[in-house]
């Protein structure tokens, strides 16, 4: 019997590519997103569109209840909102944490009882190389991804006894709406502040990264590899510059890594 997969953030980017790729490979896929109208094209792949706003408890509960038993949960919904820490309003920061962390946690809470009953489950959390390293102007995005990494590590050792695997995906540069939206937010928040020059430099760096960003299917293939492995790795890394960046972060001291990063911001 085909495994049932819930993919959040399925209206674009990694979530959309993953939903389509898994449906093409025999999975029963539910594609969830806040913008239901953008999910309709997924019908042609046999994907069942479902409404989900990960910041609203009633929406999360209704989503999981409408599916019933979820074998594989892929938490791909995310927000990248940027700006200097001094400039970002706390309500915006809280919204980022709601989407990237608390919404993920609540979905996991709701699917775990049935996974435990079935003695089977795969929970895939889409983190980022930004969950292991921080860039200026991205305090709250990186905070959310660092937190997601830590939560995943704790969860993995809680649920392995029930036959449930927790897998973290750490993409590097990947084609998505998030980078452009994040750059727009950064300019809105910090363009007229004392951090304006830094914001402009970061935006240029992101624009260069976007030109060489990997297609989302690269990450979708990593996810499939992880959920089909008998003994999956705890982390899978892919996308433009992901492995080199994480290698350098591990190799260099904090101050040397800072120098390397800031040398790219002009």
Image (cartoon, grey):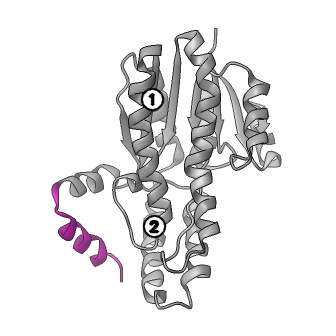
Figure check: 218 above or below 242: above
Q: Earlier in the sequence, mark 2 or mark 1?
A: 2
Q: Secondary structure at mark 2?
A: helix
Report if residue 231 lies within the magenta region. no
Q: Residue at x 16, y 63 (%)?
A: 253
Could you tell me residue 36's position as x and y percent?
A: 81, 45
Could you tell me residue 236's position as x and y percent?
A: 37, 37
Q: Nearer the viewer, residue 233 or 149?
A: 149
Assess disc 1: are there few (<14), some (14-19) or many (≥20) residues with their C-alpha within 10 Å of its C-alpha. many
> What range of the chain is rendered magenta?
251-266
Figure check: 162 above or below 85: above
* Quadrant in which the C terminus is drawn: bottom left
Q: Give the label on residue 42, or none.
A: none
Figure check: 257 above or below 152: below
- Residue 65 appears in the picture as rendered: yes
Magenta portion: prevailing SS class: helix
Q: Residue at x 62, y 45 (%)?
A: 103
Q: Is residue 2 left or right of residue 229?
A: right
Identify the residue position indicated by label 1 in the image: 166
**How many circles with numbers are drawn on the protein?**
2
Q: Nearer the viewer, residue 217 or 97?
A: 97
Q: Give the label on residue 139, or none.
A: 2
* Quadrant in which the N terminus is drawn: top right
Could you tell me residue 78's position as x and y percent?
A: 59, 51
Q: Is residue 178 left or right of residue 238?
A: right
Choose top left, top right, bottom left or bottom right for residue 198.
bottom left
CA gap between label 2 and label 1 equals 25 Å
Q: Residue at x 75, y 34 (%)?
A: 61
Choose top left, top right, bottom left or bottom right for residue 45.
top right
Whether the residues at callouts 2 and 1 have beta carbons within 8 Å, the answer is: no
Report if residue 262 lies within the magenta region. yes
Could you tell me residue 204's position as x and y percent?
A: 45, 78
């Amino acid at each position: 019997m085909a495994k049932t997969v819930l993919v959040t953030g399925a209206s674009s980017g990694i979530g959309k590519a993953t939903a389509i790729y898994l449906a093409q490979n025999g999975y029963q896929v539910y594609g969830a997103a806040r913008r239901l109208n953008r999910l309709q094209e997924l019908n042609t792949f046999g994907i069942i569109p479902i409404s989900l706003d990960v910041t609203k408890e009633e929406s999360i509960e209704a989503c999981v209840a409408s599916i019933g038993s979820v074998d594989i949960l892929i938490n791909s919904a995310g927000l990248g909102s940027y700006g200097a820490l001094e400039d970002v309003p706390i309500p915006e920061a809280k919204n980022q944490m709601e989407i990237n962390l608390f919404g993920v946690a609540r979905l996991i809470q709701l699917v775990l009882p049935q996974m435990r009953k079935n003695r089977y489950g795969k929970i895939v959390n889409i983190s980022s190389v930004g969950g292991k390293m921080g860039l200026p102007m991205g305090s709250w995005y990186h905070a959310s991804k660092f937190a997601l990494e830590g939560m995943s590590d704790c969860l993995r050792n809680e649920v392995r006894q029930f036959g449930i695997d927790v897998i973290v995906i750490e993409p590097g540069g990947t084609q998505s709406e998030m980078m452009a939206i994040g750059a727009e937010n950064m300019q809105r928040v910090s363009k007229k502040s004392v951090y304006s020059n830094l914001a402009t430099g970061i935006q240029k760096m992101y624009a260069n990264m976007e030109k060489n960003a990997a297609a989302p299917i690269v990450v979708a293939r990593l996810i499939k590899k992880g959920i089909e492995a008998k003994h999956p790795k705890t982390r899978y890394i892919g996308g433009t510059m992901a492995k080199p960046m994480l290698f350098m972060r591990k190799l260099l001291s904090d101050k040397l890594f800072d120098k390397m990063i800031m040398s790219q911001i002009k």
